[in-house]
Amino acid sequence: MSAAARVTRYKDTQPLKSLAKASQSCSAPGMAYGKCIGAKYTEVSKGMCEAEFQAFKDCVQKSFGRKW
């Protein structure tokens, strides 16, 4: 295996702390998602608040710098 083919992976030793930092800049989409869930929590169904969740997820992934 050549040196170019090897990929060094970064090992995050504090993943929850890193995720919390990344989500700090996403307060507006996070609030919108929280309000949607709060308003409909008695009527839970698959896909409810999906647009709000997707906006929050995209924001966190953008701040975090990777997708999952």
Image: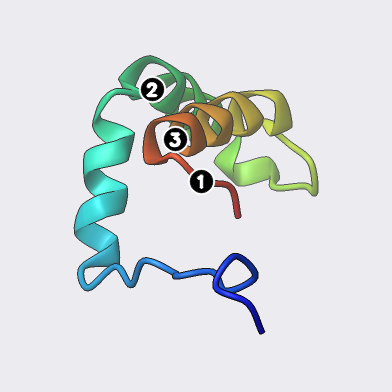
> Which residue is under mark 3?
60
How far apart are the alpha carbons under marks 2 and 1?
22 Å
Compared with 56, 3 (above or below) is below
Which quadrant of the structure image shows residue 51?
top right
Of residues 65 and 48, the one drawn nearer to the viewer in this rendering: 65
Of residues 47 and 40, the one drawn nearer to the viewer in this rendering: 47
The colour scheme applied to this rendered structure is rainbow
Which quadrant of the structure image shows residue 57?
top right
Specify which label sits upstream in the sequence, 2 or 1.
2
Residue at 32% from the left image edge and 22% from the top image edge: 27
Horizontal arrangement in the rendering, residue 19 relative to residue 40 (left or right): left
Q: Which of marks 1 and 3 is in front?
A: 1
Percent position (x, y) of residue 11? 33, 72
Question: Could you say whether the residue bearing mark 1 is in a helix, strand or loop?
Answer: loop
> Which residue is under mark 1?
66
Q: Type of residue at label 3? A: Val
Q: Nearer the viewer, mark 2 or mark 3?
A: 3
Mark 3, residues whose alpha carbon is within 10 Å: few (<14), some, or many (≥20)? many
> Which residue is under mark 2?
31
Specify which label sits upstream in the sequence, 1 or 3.
3
Mark 2, residues whose alpha carbon is within 10 Å: few (<14), some, or many (≥20)? few
Residue, far top:
28
Of residues 19 and 28, the one drawn nearer to the viewer in this rendering: 19
